[in-house]
Amino acid sequence: MNIDNTASQMRKGVLEFCILSVIKQGEAYPSDIIDKMKAANLNILEGTLYPLLTRLKNAALLSYRWEESTSGPPRKYFSLTEKGAEFYKELESTWFELANAVKALTEQDHAEEAQIENNNNFNNP
């Protein structure tokens, strides 16, 4: 089994939530989204971001506006719609439920490992 593939699938599962989280903080230009994602150690390529933004826009979760740029073509800035804000709240709730469940399971696993190690140390002085 390939850990890189599994890790990639895990990241893909939270990309929409992370992108919406960035946009929720305020209107965002795609390169700003990429920069914020990289700063959080969630690297995303333009070829991945633009189709996601289009899908979110087509689902009426995002809107955009064009702004003229002095250094090139006009820029498209994205923001959450009312529907997008409601969807974000649902995603956030789902994320915290999932994160808490995973944390409970992994902490339980670590606690059991520590108990086994303590028992082994007690039985083998």
Image: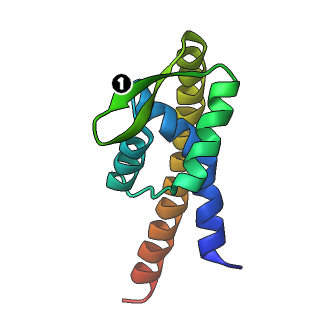
Q: Is residue 53 left or right of residue 22?
A: right
Instruction: Count numbered badges in the picture.
Output: 1
Residue 23 sits in quarter: top left
Residue 106 x %, y %: 53, 56
Residue 39 x %, y %: 32, 53
Could you say which is closer to the camera, residue 74 or residue 22?
74
Classify mark 1: helix, strand or loop: loop
The N terminus sits in image quarter: bottom right
Q: Amino acid at mark 1?
A: Gly
Could you say which is closer to the camera, residue 78 or residue 112?
78
As drawn, the residue found furthest toward the top would be 82
For label 1, the residue is 26
Q: Is residue 123 left or right of residue 14?
A: left
Could you say which is closer to the camera, residue 77 or residue 67?
67
* Residue at image coords 63%, 30%: 56
* Residue at image coords 56%, 36%: 95
* Residue at image coords 50%, 20%: 80
* Residue at image coords 50%, 38%: 19
In the depicted structure, whether residue 36 falls above or below residue 57:
below
